[in-house]
Amino acid sequence: MPDGSRPTARRSVIVSEFTNSVLDPAAPMLGPVENGGTIIANTAPGCWGPMITPRLRGGHEVTRPVYVEGAEIGDGIAIRIRDITVTSLATASGHDSSPEGFCLGDPYVAARCPVCDTVWPETHVEGIGQDAVKCDSCGNAVKPFEIVHGYTVTFDETRTVGLTLPKAAAEEIAKDANHYAALPDESRQHSILTFAPSDMPGTLIRLRPFMGQLGTCPSKAMPDSHNAGDFGAFLVGAPHDYAITAEELAEHKTDGHMDIDAVRAGAILVAPVKVRGAGVYLGDMHAGQGDGEIAGHTMDVSGSVTLQVEVVKNYPIDGPVLFPLEEDLPPLAKPFSASETAKGQRLAAKWGMGALEPLAPISVIGTAANLNLAIENGLARAAALLGMSVAEVRNRATVNGAIEIGRAPGVIQVTFLAPLARLDAVGLGDYAREQYGL
């Protein structure tokens, strides 16, 4: 969006368009939205639907990025998540496998029909079940992924609980999959409800919706699900068109694909800006998920999302920072109560010390090819953000925080109470005060 052609920034931008699962900084952005403005989006399911839709090249289906007025490379974007609402009536998911011959190196990125040898073939749905997606050219069933053990779940009217269904009910829903998935009009995916899995019927599930993808556009074209250090590692030396080097991955990714369950309504996420205008995008709404997303996938749903975005100048690190809801913080990372603070002040007076150092919770995201390396990445980012040594971050995260797993194989949170003065120095202190009433 070059200067001179950019329209006047709007107070709110409504998003109903999706990418072809690739985040490309050269592609036109929506907007611009003004600094402090609102983005309202209708999102499509991530993961399974796009995973069984070979023409989609990234494994997810995310919204077109939005240009934020005033955002420059090296800044950050503070994203207040005002609302997340599930609109799907049902979804399906499960643990996966990748049958041999149905991809060029990576089933998320380069699905292939092994009969006509077409990469990213156009496909259509015939009937239901795991062989229902057919190649338009040769009629062969194309399935870069299969469900090894899975479930179909439907939700109550308030989207508070879900119930997994038996075979007959799952097949009934599969016959009208797009309706039950509430697929947005512009979505191009096949609904995973078509597969009708039903391996654990009668299980009651709580809903706790959050965004698996939320962030800013990477500075190099990248499949959307691979915009993170763990999935992105599969692009290094890959045999398809989106191959990159390890150095390019580190330079260009923005870690928008986190699958962290605390990225939910009421939280504040700060994302790095690596292209002018930031390119805020979102998708992969999950109805709920335990830490680690250990099955590889969870309940992907359609939904509506409202965000408020604000530029943070001179953001000092290359990855996201999260200010979760207080109830989502680890016990040791919660703000001290007035009673606890008073006890601490009496201890300080007893030993001839002055006023206690004000502390505030922060959660720094780390990503890498595995969890150990992701922890190292998160510790290094936290140290760089706060101007302290990694050793000090380790100590603070031990006595006043925790290491939390967002997603296996390699997304973590380094969550701890940090000196508020250090947060003020990098322009983040007021977000902590806002979030935790400090």
Image (spheres, rainbow, N blue to C red):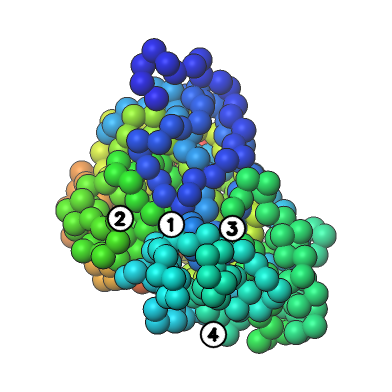
Q: Which residue is rendered at x = 45% and y = 75% of the image?
A: 115
Name the residue type under label 2: Tyr
* Image location of residue 86, percent across then percent down: 69, 54
How many tags in the picture? 4
Residue 331 visible in the displayed image: yes
Q: Kindly check if marks 1 and 3 are in contact, taking CB atoms under 8 A apart as contact.
A: no
* Residue pointed to by mark 4: 148
* Front in this rendered view, residue 120 or 273: 120
* Image location of residue 366, percent across then percent down: 32, 58
Q: Nearer the viewer, mark 4 or mark 3?
A: 3
- Lateral position of residue 4 relative to residue 263, left or right: left
Q: CA distance from mark 4 to mark 1?
A: 23 Å
Q: Residues within 10 Å of mark 2 (few under 14, many from 20)?
A: some
Q: Earlier in the sequence, mark 1 or mark 3?
A: 1
- Lateral position of residue 1 relative to residue 384, left or right: right
Question: Among all residues in the image, which is located at the extreme top?
Answer: 4
* Residue pointed to by mark 1: 57
Location of the N terminus (image quadrant): top left
* Residue pointed to by mark 2: 242
Q: Earlier in the sequence, mark 4 or mark 1?
A: 1
